[in-house]
Image: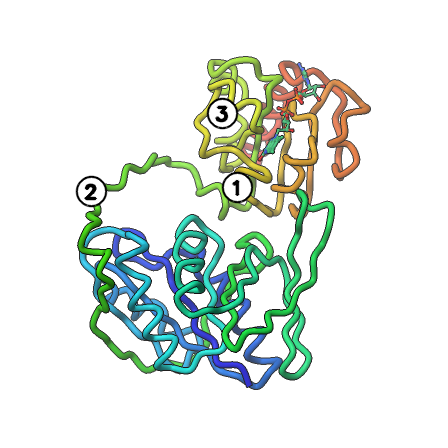
Amino acid sequence: MKKILIVAEMLEGEVRKATLSAMAMAKTVAAASEGTYDVLVLGDGAEAAGEQMSSYGAEKVITCEIEGGYVCERYAATLEKVVRDGDYTIVVATASAFGKDLLPRVAAKLGAGVASDISGVDVDGEEVVYTRPMYAGNVIGRLKVTSDIAVVTVRQADFEAAAPDDEESDLESIDMEQEEVSSKIRFVGLEQVKSERPELSEADVVVSGGRALKSSENFEKVLEPLVDSLNAAMGASRAACDAGYVSPELQVGQTGKVVAPKLYIAVGISGAIQHLAGMKGSKIIVAINKDKEAPIAQVADYFLAEDLFKAVPELTQAVDQAKADR
Ligand code: FAD
């Protein structure tokens, strides 16, 4: 029987939707192993935010107020203590910047094995096998964690957000644990790029542009109208980000964000293996590329062999027209 602890991620006093992917993984493992799961919410405003998590079928939602912004060293000791005191066998968070930063430190403190960035999980009784894409998705690793506690991070794009249950969880509030080093670290501030558009890793539709856009002006004039017509998030290839056409946080791929929207439109993107690693889980992939032989054709459900500077404005116009006709 597995006893699982989900580590919730907070932003500006709320639990982020990304947490629901870790929750989905926990629900799967708990159901298959007749286990249970609890949630730990850490941060500024955790007690109020904990209420948000109390309708997802967890036995218990534990909250711990930690003032100021997130700093790994200020969170890790509390998480370690909760895991030890609660005899948890699996600790899971979503593989966001938060999960990727916090969980390795906690794993080291616990002497626990890690399955990071997993895309799937199989449970057979007490045995849990994690699936993990490796080498830009060219190899799928299947691994077991042999230590008593397993620390796991899950790919948000591969675990559909858990839905609320009818069950109400118990709420418990605990005090923060400090490790000595945390007094030497101070949270200074968080600078966020605010956008009216949906968040890239959570959007249903993503429109990404590549090097072929040639400039930031073309991203603005040619691609953005299509992005906004479709109420989509905007993404980009690394070549477009490196060239400074758009900000690096829009990068999709092995070293960028992993997305799996219902619709992914790749505009002027060749489809290098490192880009595919970040989007090939999308439900429907559309590619607009003037080269029919471009590798993106191998994963595209629809391929338009056309100059993007002609095709994208036409497509935008067609979408606007269809919306007006509704
Ligand atoms: P290009 O490869 O130059 O492709 C441009 C495409 O546009 C071509 O297919 C061309 O036919 C088409 N085109 C040109 N003009 C037009 C036009 N007018 N109309 C229509 N189509 C046109 N890349 C990522 O994207 N994400 C990553 O996370 C990432 N991580 C990496 C990590 C490592 C370690 C390495 C080595 C590389 C990584 N890369 C990543 C880079 C990757 O290998 C490619 O170089 C990059 O994805 C190419 O970007 P692109 O498709 O925009 O450009």
Q: Position of residue 193 (x, y in %)?
A: 34, 34
> Which residue bears the numbered disc 2?
188
Q: Relative to the observer, which residue lies in front, 15 or 165?
A: 15
Rendering quarter of residue 115: bottom right
Direction from residue 34 to residue 63 in the image, left or right? left
Q: Residue at x 56, y 13 (%)?
A: 214
Q: Quadrant of ligand 1?
A: top right
Is 4 drawn above or below residue 68 in the view shown? Answer: below
- State yes or no: Cβ of the residue under disc 1 lies below 8 Å from any atom of ligand 1: no
> Which residue bears the numbered disc 3?
224
Is 283 drawn above or below residue 4 in the view shown? Answer: above
Q: Circle 2 sits in a helix, a strand or a loop, which is it?
A: loop
Is 301 drawn above or below residue 60 in the view shown? Answer: above
Looking at the rendered structure, the kind of residue marked 1 is: Lys
**Label 1, label 3: how far apart the Cα atoms are:** 19 Å
- Marks 2 and 1 in Cβ contact (< 8 Å): no
Q: Circle 1 sits in a helix, a strand or a loop, which is it?
A: loop
Q: Position of residue 80 (x, y in %)?
A: 35, 70
Rendering quarter of residue 141: bottom right
Dot placed on the residue nearer the N-terminal end, 2 or 1: 2
Rendering quarter of residue 316: top right
- Looking at the rendered image, the disc whose residue lies closer to the viewer, 1 or 3, is 1
Looking at the rendered structure, the kind of residue marked 2 is: Val
Q: Position of residue 250 (x, y in %)?
A: 48, 33
Question: Residue 257: which numbered mark, if any?
Answer: 1
**Label 2, label 1: how far apart the Cα atoms are:** 25 Å
Dot placed on the residue nearer the N-terminal end, 1 or 3: 3
Direction from residue 295 to residue 33 in the image, left or right? left
